[in-house]
Image (cartoon, coloured by chain):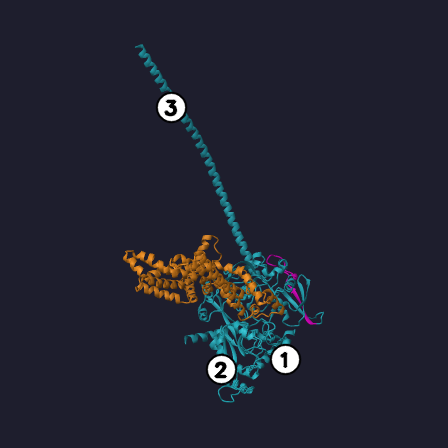
Amino acid sequence: MKNGKIVKILLILLTLTLSITPVMAQDEVEQSGPWADELFFKIYLNPEAEYLALKTGDINIMDWELPAEKVADALADPSILTDSTADLGYYLIDINCQRWPTSNVHFRRALAHLVDKSRIETDILQGFGYALDSPVPVVMGGWANPDIRTYEFSSELAAAELELGGFVDTDSDGIRNDPVTEENMADVLFYIRIDDPERKQAGEWLAQELIALGVPVEGELAVERSVCADAVMDTPDGEWNVYTGGWGITRDPDHLTDFYHSKEFDPDCVGGWRGYNYPGFVNSTFDTWADLLKTESSFEDTKEAAYMCQKILAEQVPGIPMYGHVGVKAYSADWTGVVNMVGQGINSWWSCLNMHPADADYGGVIEYGIKSDIETLNPLTAEWTYTWEVLDKIYETPYWYNPYDISEDWGWLTESWDIEDWESPTGVDGTKITFHFVENAKWHDGVPFTAEDLKFTYEYIREFGIPRYLPNIQFIEDIVKVDDYTLEVYQNTTSYFAFHYLNGPSVLPKHIWEDVGAGWQDYDPVAEGTLIGLGPWKFVEYVPGEYVHLVANDDYFKASTIAKQGRMTASLEEELEEAALAEETARDIAALSEQINELTTTTSQLESQISSLETEISNLEGGLTSASNLSYASIAIAVVVGAVAVYMARRET
Amino acid sequence: MSLKSYILKRLVYSVVLLFFAISLNFVIFRMAPGNPIQVVASGMRLEPEMVERLIELWGLQEPLHVQYIRYIRSTLTWDFGYSYNSLEPVSREIMERLPNTLVLMGASLFFAIIFGTVFGIYAAYKRGSLYDLTSVTVSLFSYALPTFWMGLLMIYVGGYVLGLFPLAGTMSRPPPTDPILRVFDLAWHLFLPGLTLFLFQYGGWLLMTRSTMLETLHEDYITTARAKGATERSVLFKHAFRNAMLPLVTNVALQIPGLLNGAILTETVFSWRGLGLYTWTAIQFNDYPVLQALFFIFALVTVVCNFLVDIVYGYIDPRIQY
């Protein structure tokens, strides 16, 4: 009962937070910084320890999502604030469109009617997620089509769809008959991920609903992702029907093309697997719209294509979107400027730029709890998400986007840009993108940034085939530096998203990386002392397994004037204090020297007095010695005289 | 058989065993589901040229027997290739983490052996007493508790409620420059994870010592020793414990391989940068080169320890004939 109440309270709070997040919008984002002086990333490999560190004040902000049982405690703690964010990703029931009976659209629609999303929301996610009908989650804002076919949870509607498909229990033995063989249906092969309790539960419920409707199911409880990947994605025959899948996505809805275009389906696994479209969805109308989605150059046309793709997917059901996740993260109430970025949450790049103590306009040390050690600080080999939580504070990409509306690009290093149609020499339609850069950007070592640096970055990636960034530059035909602050990039695609691809790689300093050449893979910028970026934070130190230390870059091209001047003033005050202290010390030293001199003089006077006294003593001693010598001589003479006198007297007698 | 030929025979056995372990290590990872390219891609879209590049980089285009020979050669030269996750050399990453694991496991095992043995002997000596009952109950309790749970409890009580110890990590920030202070700092950070592992191992040691001591205390030679008028201390330590320590010595050697992999949960809970944590991360990311290297090291340590036990046993047990 008590737990039920807590869950209800949480649900309300989370819903409220989610609903007000977009309203907070841009006025909460300060487009300059960093406002804090220093940034420490401290590694906590489990959420409990990180949460306790927040409570003890060891850190100011968490990147672990709060464990469900800690949310009530965090909400009740006045020293902690929480915020929730929906992930950029979704969980779904993947359906093999190439294997009977799931190749039948009515069967797939029946499956869609059997997924009880509201039960998943309340009983499984318990407020930490939301139901989905489209593979474009609502957090992607305008890209999500609100007007698509939805499937109410209903076994009656599912049964009706099955009957439309010819799956009827003709012999009344409790098992539906196959419309092709007229025999009892063969087992539906269901791969359920048991490494994820949420997907396991959702999958088991669906399997139970199917069985209850007379559809035999063979449940393959796959132990983990790679086992499923082997059976579902890597096998040419595709010996599966249903799978509890999930995807992480980016801010662009081009995943619709990647996941469901027929060209992404590789039935013979020539490329080593069945491709992103491993459900084997092949639909020419969809393909047309999916192609347009990736080639249209205007936002409106691209959006229309995205809408149509979602509409077709909802009709044809190659997958059943189930839910997206919502995570709650916490930070210290003593801090302000936290930016709850869409898809990422409070531990965003913008938070690090904006955060400062609530009782001061700037300054302080951000203690940022990070859930993993970093693997490498080489920006070309770093793959790990948490490594990039550090690296993206040091390096810079050409532009940024609104953290509250991720479809809106913001000028940054690139102050503005022009996108024009262009036809390549081979006659392919393309685009010419002209970047206009800010003129005050400097690398952390003081060298000015120019257009040459971005040109070098793209060319370096292409020349050495840097795997992480090859997809980003795959459409580049030519790069022309117009002047130090203008660069033209010619791409052989008209895609609206191609501009976003160019924002993937972090800009590299040419004056450092041109010497690295082919040795990029083994290059260690930390050891070489060349972890030099353009970003708001400068690298100081990394202690493996412990922490990463960064300091505010006051020469950042978007530096906050107030914070910068404040820091300069503080630094000057510190210098003055030091100078004053030095002056005082000098005075003290002078006084002491004087005393020492006086003492020395006194000492020398005393020494001379001692010396004269010693002389006198010595004279006296000399006198005494002479006197005593005289005495001895007198005695000797007396004795001799006496002896002579005695002798003489005896002689006389 | 002379001692020399006995050692030689055990050495040959050990090398053959190690060879099988290495080969099995190769086969297991080739049979494992999923392909490494996808592991690296992890949802990222890879272009065909990228796939080819990675295949070439890891030599996956070569026939299995060539891969096997290359694997044997590189294993024996301590070259485990590059981690799929960090793209850093695996051997370097292992060497960076090894000292932390040795410190954590070594300290906890050392104290567990000392305390477990002493209190185990006393519990056996006082069999049936309140002390014995309490010791056995506490040992069973500490031995049965999951280490991750105990670790979280330690963090909560020692780190949060009492605020006496750090919640994570191996050193303070900034680390002390004075070597002595640095040792103290390490010991301070080591306390909670070490105590967690100590409690886990201590119970086992106490129960085993008690059980072996109980067996020997009922032997005729103990009665004879007492009849000869030997003191209780002499009976306990010179006569009983000396004979009871044979299985304990074996167990120490066999526990050493467990030192390397037993700390997975503890290191993860305490953010302790050692081999256990490395293993956990590698499992999470299907980082096969790392897992292959770690399994090889575990196998190597096990084989070496077994070999040493065989040799040491011959020295401490006069009944062993070569």
- Looking at the rendered structure, the kind of residue marked 1 is Ser
Of residues B90 and A411, the one nearer the viewer is B90
> Which of the two labelled residues, at mark 2 and mark 3, occupies the earlier sequence position?
2
Q: From what the image shows, is residue A299 above or below residue B231? A: below
> Which of the two labelled residues, at mark 3 and mark 1, occupies the earlier sequence position?
1
Q: Does the CB distance between marks 1 and 2 fall below 8 Å?
A: no
Q: Which residues are magenta?
A: A428-452
Q: From what the image shows, is residue B99 above or below residue A166? A: above
| Residue topped by disc 1 | A284
- Looking at the rendered structure, the kind of residue marked 3 is Ser
User: What is the quadrant of the N terminus of chain B in the image?
Assistant: bottom left
> Which of the two labelled residues, at mark 1 and mark 2, occupies the earlier sequence position?
2
Q: Give the chain of mark 2.
A: A
Q: Quadrant of residue B49?
A: bottom right
Q: Residue A275 appears at what percent x and percent y?
A: 59, 74
In the image: residue A148, left or right of residue A426: left
- For label 2, the crowd category at 10 Å Cα-Cα, with few meaning under 14, some 14 to 19 and many 20 or more, is many
Q: Give the chain of mark 1.
A: A
| Residue topped by disc 3 | A628
Q: Give the chain of mark 3.
A: A
Q: Does the CB distance between marks 3 and 1 fall below 8 Å?
A: no
Q: Residue A32 appears at what percent x and percent y?
A: 57, 63
- For label 1, the crowd category at 10 Å Cα-Cα, with few meaning under 14, some 14 to 19 and many 20 or more, is few
User: What is the quadrant of the C terminus of chain B in the image?
Assistant: bottom left
Q: Quadrant of residue A145?
A: bottom right
Marking on residue A209: 2
Helix, strand or loop at label 1? It is helix
Image hue for chain A: cyan
Q: Residue A55 appears at what percent x and percent y?
A: 45, 65
